[in-house]
Every structure is written in structure tokens, then in C-alpha cells.
Amino acid sequence: MLSRTKVYISFDYDRDKALKDLLVGQANNEGSPFEIADGSLHEAEPDDEWEEKARERIGRADTVIVLLGHKTHRAPGVLKEVKIARELGKRVIQIIGYKDRQYTRVPQGGVLYNWTWENLVKILGGPSRP
């Protein structure tokens, strides 16, 4: 069995949890080229503890996917996660979460893609959907 790409999902925890749930659902599809290593933490803990946990989780991933919602570019947790991913040398990409909404790229968030199954397969490897 081929190993699947481990993905950390970075998203605006307060606004875009539904996007994360959709991506997790796609990871569970038969033949998915990726699996979820972890996802964004809610910033309720003291800052240094939060960053340490985020660094550990991101460290387990091969790729960080930033799910772009309307205000993701302003979400402090997402900005910190992208910074940590860059420090760890992880590949970071951005996926447009809503086709009918405005979005702004996250600084240093990587290449921007439309959210399609074909793009996920191309980006993360694996067979195409039948």
C-alpha cells in the first residue's frame, strides 16, 4: 500500500470549521492521496503552549494546507501556523474554500489552488477519482 501524504489543515477556527470538516471528509474517501495529520488549534491556551503544540503537530505533516475563507488572512492562528510551517521547512499551499466569496491570500501561504478533487490529487499525489 502506498503511503499517503500527511496534511496539517490551517483554517480560521472561529469562521471556517465547516471547510475543515469537508477536507477531512475527502481524506476519508477511498483512494484519497492524503490523510489528516492534524488541524488548527483554538488559541485558548497561553501563547507559548499553543505555539509549542502547533509546532509539534505541524512537524508531523508533509504539507500544510491553508483553507482560505473570507477573513483567513487576518486569523492570528493561521498566520502563526504558516510561520511555523516555514520555519520547519514544510510545503505550504492555499486552497480557496468558498467559490462565491471574496478571499485574500495569506502572506507566505504558498501557491493558490481552486478546491477540486483533481487539484488535490495533483498537489498531494495518488490516483485520480474514477
Image (tube, rainbow, N blue to C red):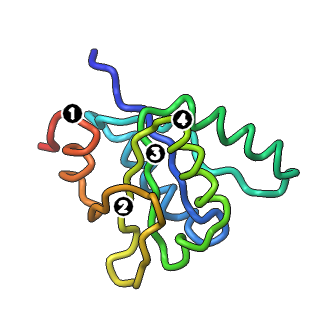
Picture quadrant where residue 103 is located: bottom left
For the residues carrying marks 3 and 4, which lies nearer the camera in this image? 4
Q: Secondary structure at mark 4?
A: loop
Contact (Cβ within 8 Å) of mark 2 with mark 4? no
Amino acid carrying label 1: it is Gly
Query: Which residue is identified by label 4?
Result: 88
User: For the image shown, how many numbered marks are present on the structure?
Assistant: 4
Residue 106 in the image, given as x and y percentages of width and height = 47, 66
For the residues carrying marks 2 and 4, which lies nearer the camera in this image? 4
Query: Which residue is identified by label 3?
Result: 64
Query: Which residue is identified by label 1?
Result: 126
Q: In the drawing, does residue 56 fall left or right of residue 44?
A: left
Work out whether mark 3 precedes mark 2 in sequence or the reverse, and give the earlier one. 3
The quadrant in which the N terminus is found is top left
Residue drawn where x is 28% and y is 61% of the image: 113
Q: Secondary structure at mark 2?
A: strand
